[in-house]
Amino acid sequence: MSHYLNIDYLDMTFATPRGPLNVLNNVNLKVQKGDFVSIIGHSGCGKSTVLNIVAGLLRATTGGVLLEEREVVEPGPERAVVFQNHSLLPWMTVYENVRLAVDKVRRGAPRAERDAWTLENLERVHMTHAKDQYPGEISGGMKQRVGIARALAMEPKVLLMDEPFGALDALTRAHLQDEVMKLQSELGNTVLMVTHDVDEAVLLSDRIVMMTNGPAATIGEVLEIDLPKPRERLVMADNAQYNHYRAEVLRFLHERHKNPESEAA
Amino acid sequence: MSTNYADMQLVGVKRENDKDAEGRTEPTVGRETKPAERIDTAGADPTAHDDRFEVMADMFQRWIPVLVLPLITFGLLLGGWTWLQSTVSPDLPTPVQVWDEAVFLLGDPFYDHGPNDMGIGWQVLYSLGRVLTGFGLAALVGIPLGLMMGASLSMRRALGPVVQLLRPVSPLAWLPLGLLVFEAVNPSAIFVIFITSIWPILINTAAGVQAIPRDYTNVSQVLRLGRLEAARKILIPATMPYILTGMRLALGIAWMVIVAAEMLTGGVGIGFFIWDEWNNLNVASIIVSIFVIGLVGIALDGGVALIKKRFDYAPA
Ligand SMILES: Nc1ncnc2c1ncn2[C@@H]1O[C@H](COP(=O)(O)OP(=O)(O)O)[C@@H](O)[C@H]1O
Ligand SMILES: [Mg+2]
């Protein structure tokens, strides 16, 4: 049966100076429309590689990705990416960064409409006040918000996020997680997010995909998070079910698939 | 091939982390205005009265290195010169003679008594005209070519070895070819400046394109920007600081080379002016010209630095 997003039999081997490096081995994943799916795993296992293949920025060695039954062969705005390091263009203002995307996806729309859509998306992430500032002048959390606004403005079929909050301090991260939860419940985006933060994964996801360690990493386990939404961070802290899920993920990561670096130590 | 190219980049290429160091050496003007600003704010502060002495002492300490040290160097230079003139080399004009000559030359820089007798202002302007023409042409050719070289491995492979071979050649070696082809001295001098300027511009532009972070090209790909759009919105703005560094280097070298080129080609221009004054044994005039050339060089460099500032972006 065909799902909204099909990731089928992905194999990825990079050619490196020290010979071929088999990073992914037979990665299969189905995502339903409106799902929030997290990919979790130790650093270097190949999470970003999976995401970049879905984005079309990398071509899998074998296997492929189908989105609404169409094969992904190149990057495109219907698979917008929020990168870990925000990747805003530093010579453009916050507004111009979002507008660049709007001009592309709403090509042909009247100028006023494109302006309104840019502002609407900046408002969604509460960044209207900084619209004329440059990325170099705003904080890391604000940059990430703008990155999210830019991605949302593309109205993607799948929103791809690669450790979107990885570089932020704990408080800012929690704040942005809450906002992403809120936005997702309002807009019903289909989201594929890479993370290595267990709480983030359990709090935000409908499903957590746990990857084994590389090389030749694959999907070890999939955990359905059956918690009602919206989820409140503080309520969840005392929720037995939440803590059970949390423990499941931790067990996977720290018992069954230990961090290769800590094992070596 | 690729390693060769990496070697080539070493020349005159500014890496990201060099920028700060460079930025600090640029605006001497900006640095000198700082003490004044400090006094202003201190004056607005009601408690500042007690601190006035301290502020003045502070200002004094800041100005000592900025003003006094260069003055000492200058004094030593004058002293050495006078000593040299009075002992080993009596043919050298004295500082006073040079000063008189400067007053004479700069008093009426734009007189025009026919092509063989024009004021030093005209000489400088003619040279500047040649430099800016050759430099402008080099930018017109070098920037697009550099962008293509940076963006395409095939272009790098095609052009890299040629650029490498020609870059170390003194631009003056091209002068006879210019004379042969153009059969006139003025276009030949411009041609020499073109050759001088093209390498730094070309190499820095190409290096700038290659230094574009993967993030920016990812954005361009996800947005499916077309070739032209990607060039206009991402490639060129991202490369701009490198392009301008290349242009700054090019202009600096071009201003040096024009003097030598004009000595060979003759005509109106500061280079031939110096040569002519040498034939007249007017050494004082030559020394004045050296200072004038230096000052114009500073102005040119400052001009490009200003433009560069406008296009530099704070790394996000
Ligand atoms: N372009 C590439 N060439 C060679 N090896 C790569 C490339 N991209 C990633 N890798 C390797 O693939 C592995 C997985 O990388 P990545 O997907 O970034 O891991 P993660 O995002 O889980 O930390 C790492 O060992 C990395 O060194
Ligand atoms: Mg990663």
Image: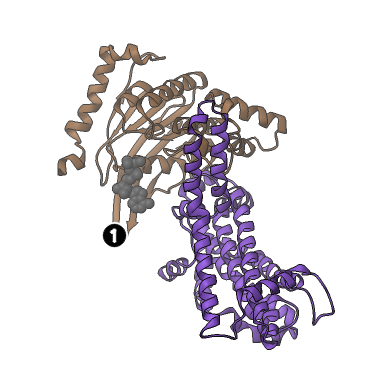
Residue A133 figure quarter:
top right
Answer with left or right where residue A180 lies relative to residue B138. Answer: left
Count residues near mark 1 (Cα–Cα under 10 Å), then give few for <14, some for 14-19, many for 20+: few
Q: Quadrant of residue A48?
A: top left
Q: Percent position (x, y) of residue B6?
A: 43, 66
Viewport quadrant of the N terminus of chain A: top left
Q: Is residue A165 left or right of residue B27?
A: left
Nearest to the observer: residue A135 or residue B44: B44
Q: Which amino acid does label 1 sit on?
A: Gly
Q: Where is residue A207 in the image (x, y as percent from the top left)?
A: 35, 25
Circle 1 residue = A19
Q: Residue at x 60, y 61 (%)?
A: B301
Rendered shade, chain A: brown
Which subunit holds the residue at mark 1? Answer: A
**Of A42 and B133, the residue lying toward us:** B133
B105 or B201, which is in the foreground? B105
Front-lying residue, B91 or A145: B91
Q: The purple chain is which one?
A: B
Report how many numbered discs are placed on residues in the image.
1
Residue at the extreme front = B86
At 34% from the left and 39% from the top, the residue drawn is A47
Give the x, y percent position of residue B70. Answer: 51, 60
The answer to whether residue B271 is above or below residue B228 is below
Q: Is residue B57 visible?
A: yes
